[in-house]
Image (cartoon, grey):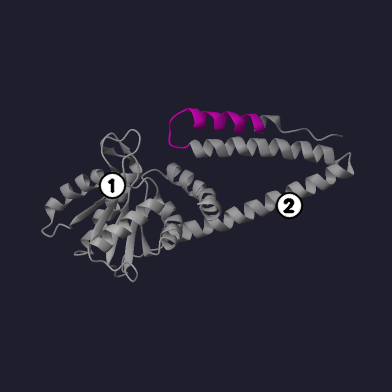
Amino acid sequence: MREKIPYWTIVLLTLAGLALVVIPNGMRFTGFLFLGSAALWLSGAFLRRWARDSRMGRLFWRAFLMGTALVLALLMGIEAAVVFRGETDNSGVPVDAVIVLGAGVNGETPSAALQSRIDAAAEYLQYHPGVPVVLSGGQGPGESVTEAEAMRRALSVRWELYEDSPIWLLEERSTNTAENFRYSKELLAANGVNTETAVIAVVTNDFHCFRAHMIARREGLHVVGVSAELPWWWLTANYYVREAFAVVKTALFD
């Protein structure tokens, strides 16, 4: 008796994936992941059927299972490292400078990701006064001001409540994380920070801490992460899963 292909499961994964990709909701990656899962499931179902009737099919089926298992094991290992780094508390580590990484700005309004970084930076800087602070982020599509300027405005308003306001160093040229660190390093060096020996706190979202650390090391910086959490768990889950693939891309191609 031939095994039936689970068409309904594949159809549901496909429809859910298309909905997440097409409807603006911040979860396009999860949508593409659902579509990829549907394609993988369909391929596996056909290979398993072929394996029942052919020796060659059995070879391909075994290779498919081994390859899928290896990829999943790799991604799960990376995901564990990403989660561990994002959950690490570095609030008590002495630092010589702070870099706040930019994220999207809607016109002049910080996105949810950027707002969470602003909030985390404001809290962190209360307990680490007197260190240079670089607000790093250029201006992208749909942004009326640079990400650095959006952060400066939000943090400056908050610092009206405190006596010792930090000196904000604005890095407004970068378009990606590598440039965030490269140009921030130049700015810190120009303001008297020895970037060869300095310990630098990097404020970014929890899911991004691991990859930010990777990129910072490539730029010759010694950093510790300061985690900012998104307000919605489903977006956090989406970005955590996406980061495993982003880490692979960064390691292989960036």
Residue 192: image quadrant is bottom left
Residue 203 is marked as none
Residue, disc 2: 66
Q: Is residue 228 visible?
A: no
Residue, disc 1: 172
Give 185 or 130, whichever is nearer the viewer: 185
Residue 78 location (% of width, % of height): 55, 57
Determine the secondary structure under disc 1: loop
Neighbor class of circle 1 (other Cα within 10 Å; few <14, some 14-19, many 20+) is many
Residue drawn where x is 37% and y is 50% of the image: 229
Is label 1 in contact with label 2 (beta carbons under 8 Å)?
no
Q: State yes or no: residue 148 in magenta.
A: no
Residue 162: image quadrant is bottom left
In the depicted structure, whether residue 118 falls above or below residue 186: above
Residue 13 location (% of width, % of height): 60, 33
In the depicted structure, whether residue 103 falls above or below residue 182: above
Residue 7 location (% of width, % of height): 70, 30
In the depicted structure, whether residue 82 falls above or below residue 12: below
Which region is colored magenta?
10-27
- Majority secondary structure of magenta residues: helix
Neighbor class of circle 2 (other Cα within 10 Å; few <14, some 14-19, many 20+) is few
> Horizontally, is 161 left or right of 169 in the view?
left
Q: Is residue 39 visible?
A: yes
Give 93 or 6, whichever is nearer the viewer: 93
Position of the N terminus, as image quadrant, is: top right
- How far is mark 1 from mark 2, CA to CA? 46 Å
Looking at the image, is mark 1 or mark 2 earlier in the sequence?
2
> Horizontally, is 244 left or right of 67 in the view?
left
